[in-house]
Amino acid sequence: MRVAQVINVRPENFEKYAALHADPWPEVNSMIKECNISNYSIYHYNGTLFAYFEYSGDDYEADMAKMAADPKTQEWWSLCKPCQEPVADAAEGEWWKDIRELYHLD
Amino acid sequence: MRVAQVINVRPENFEKYAALHADPWPEVNSMIKECNISNYSIYHYNGTLFAYFEYSGDDYEADMAKMAADPKTQEWWSLCKPCQEPVADAAEGEWWKDIRELYHLD
């Protein structure tokens, strides 16, 4: 399963966000992989972050809940989240917004 | 090598672009693969197209030139290009604009 998502980055915190992601915490990366996510990239253009990743587990919601319950991940998010702001049309409570795939070629 | 790119989609032609990419021409897909591109996805959010692909060849410019010289690809592009418009800060002559990777986890 492929997932692509968007979120805005606060301009005043962009450099902080970029620095965090240039040197991510090994424990956070390990937890992501443990939650069956791989080939995960985050790109930036014009105030918007685009994420792309692949999910290979069989219970995405359970894996996301597991990640959200991890203390080190929570600590990481406490640094990242002030740098981000959900896009205007994100659903209530939604952080990263899933976006629509128009095309795929393996 | 991973590549992510953005371009705008003209709102009046979005549905046409989406329909083309829901049913891509086999010859165009074959040429993309022959040019060493794989795992190629195009996403849409809020008037912007976001492309992600992986390149496994050793001469990206030569492969892109090969693709551009393919008559069937040119015919496909003649349908796609009127649906698209380069982003405001694209370089002179640039169509899709490469964007910056902030993070990657294999």
Image: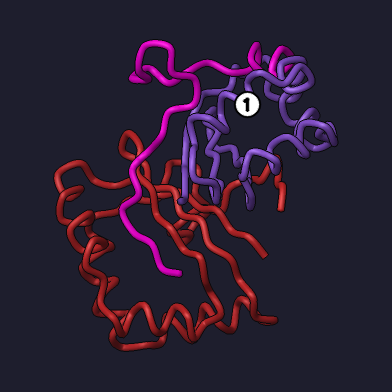
Chain colours: A red, B purple
User: Is residue B84 a member of the stretch shown in magenta?
Assistant: yes
Residue at position x 31%, y 85% from top? Answer: A27
Task: Chain letter for mark 1, please.
Answer: B
Q: Range of the magenta residues?
A: B77-106
**Percent x, y for residue A59?**
66, 81
- How many numbered tags mark residues here? 1
Q: Nearer the viewer, residue B36 or A86?
A: B36
Question: Relative to A68, is B12 on the left or the right?
Answer: right
Residue at which label 1 appears: B66
**Percent x, y for residue B49?**
55, 33
- In the image, residue A41 sits, relative to residue B77, either above or below, namely below
Q: Which quadrant: the N terminus of chain A?
A: bottom right
Question: Relative to A8, is A76 on the left or the right?
Answer: left
Residue at position x 73%, y 31% from top? Answer: B18
User: Is residue A52 a member of the stretch shown in magenta?
Assistant: no
Q: Nearer the viewer, residue B14 or B90?
A: B90
- In the image, residue A99 sits, relative to residue B82, either above or below, namely below
Question: Relative to A13, is B50 on the left or the right?
Answer: right
Question: Relative to B68, is B6 on the left or the right?
Answer: left
Residue at position x 30%, y 88% from top? Answer: A71
**Percent x, y for residue B25?**
84, 31
